[in-house]
Image (cartoon, grey):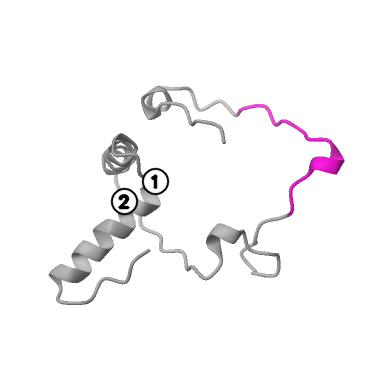
Amino acid sequence: MSRKGSLLSLRDRDSAPSPVATEPEARTAAPIASSTGSSPVAPSRQGKKAMTGYFSPEMSFAMHMTARKHGMSLQDAMAEAFNDWLRKMGESPVGK
């Protein structure tokens, strides 16, 4: 597994598109689910449902940096926050 670069280095970088690398045909990965749901689903997404929100760039950056600092993925940090909110509202936490 490759290590992701620093988020700080991404903050001020130009938005120029990166060149697309092509893989040999024999190594092409299987397609991941499309919005129509007709393709196979990535194993990490099986049995899960997407939840989307729009936040300020500052909130996004703070969440990504804090999650990374604590060795968590953003998805795990969000799941923890949602479970804390559910407890606050008197509901049972449901995990990831």
Relative to 79, residue 7 above or below: above
The reply to whether the magenta stretch includes residue 42 is no
Could you tell me residue 5's position as x and y percent?
Answer: 46, 27
Quadrant of the frame with the N terminus: top right
Locate the C terminus by quadrant: bottom left
Q: Main secondary structure of the magenta part?
A: loop
Quarter occupied by residue 71: top left
Looking at the rendered structure, the kind of residue marked 1 is Ser
User: Does the residue at mark 1 contact the one at mark 2 (Cβ under 8 Å)?
Assistant: yes
Q: Residues within 10 Å of mark 2 (few under 14, many from 20)?
A: some
Residue 34 shown left or right of residue 66 in the figure: right
* Residue depicted at x 31% and y 49%: 55
- The residue shown at (31%, 37%) is 61
Q: Quadrant of residue 43?
A: bottom right
Q: Is residue 29 part of the magenta span, yes or no?
A: yes
Q: Name the residue that disc number 2 marks.
A: 77
Q: Is residue 81 left or right of residue 34?
A: left
93 relative to 18 in the view: left or right? left
Residue at 64% x, 61% y is 33
* Rendering quarter of residue 95: bottom left
Q: Which residues are magenta?
A: 18-30
Q: Position of residue 59 (x, y in %)?
A: 27, 43
Alpha carbon distance from label 1 to label 2? 6 Å
Q: Secondary structure at mark 2?
A: helix
Residue count near mark 1 (Cα–Cα under 10 Å), binned few <14, some 14–19, many ≥20: some
**Residue 44 located left or right of residue 36:** left
| Residue tagged 1 | 73
Secondary element at image label 1 = loop
Residue 77 x, y percent position in the rendering? 31, 51
Label placed on residue 40: none
Q: Which residue type does callout 2 highlight?
A: Ala
